[in-house]
Image (cartoon, rainbow, N blue to C red):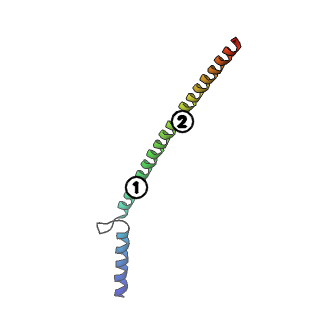
Amino acid sequence: MRMRIRDKKRETRKRVKWKGDVEGGGATWKELQMRKEEYMEELEMRKEEEEEEEEEEEEEEEEEEEEEEEEEEEEEEEEEEEEEKVKGKEEVT
């Protein structure tokens, strides 16, 4: 009978220490809840920061694409103007 009680005490001690208190003595339920809440808040903050970074990157990519498209349009316009000049010279001669 004494063995069983001693074994039960050991199991509960191990379980409480396993729940997260490295310093020893075990953590209370309220402490564990507070840690959980703090951890969840940190996760939310990290997610928000990552989302903001992704949005910024997407905006930068869009700006770069727009700049490239504008450059391509300018090049096409210049080519068309050169062709018109060449056609104009051919018509004159």
Residue toward you, 89 or 12: 89
Q: In this view of the protein, which residue sits in the foreground, 30 or 62?
A: 62
| Outermost residue toward the front in this view | 93
Instruction: Say few, some or many: other residues with alpha carbon within 10 Å of mark 2 (under 14 / 14 to 19 / 20 or more).
Output: few
Spatial CA distance of label 1 from label 2 is 35 Å
User: Which amino acid type is marked by label 1?
Assistant: Tyr
The N terminus lies in quadrant: bottom left
Secondary structure beneath disc 1? Answer: helix
**Residue occupied by mark 2:** 62
* Residue drawn at 37 percent across, 57 percent down: 34
Q: 60 or 51, which lies in front?
A: 60
Task: Look at the numbered disc 2 and give the secondary structure of its residue.
Answer: helix
Mark toward the viewer: 1 or 2: 2
Give the left or right position of residue 22, taking residue 40 as reference: left
Counting residues from the start of the chain, the first of labels 1 and 2 encountered is 1
Q: In this view, does 59 lie above or below 13?
A: above
Q: In this view, does 79 lie to the left or right of 12?
A: right
- Identified by mark 2, the residue type is Glu
Q: Quadrant of residue 7?
A: bottom left
Q: In this view, does 10 lie above or below 54?
A: below
Residue 66 x %, y %: 55, 32
Which residue in the rendered view is the most extreme toward the top? 92
Q: Where is residue 59 in the image (x, y as percent from the top left)?
A: 51, 36
| Residue at position x 43%, y 45% in the image | 49
Residue 39: image tag: 1
Q: Quadrant of the rendered structure where residue 77 is?
A: top right
Q: In which quarter of the image is the C terminus?
A: top right
Left/right placement of residue 83 relative to residue 9 reads right
- The disc at residue 21 is none
Image coordinates for residue 41, horizontal then vertical, percent? 41, 51
Q: Which residue is drawn at 65% across and 18% down?
A: 86
Residue in front for this viewpoint, 78 or 41: 78
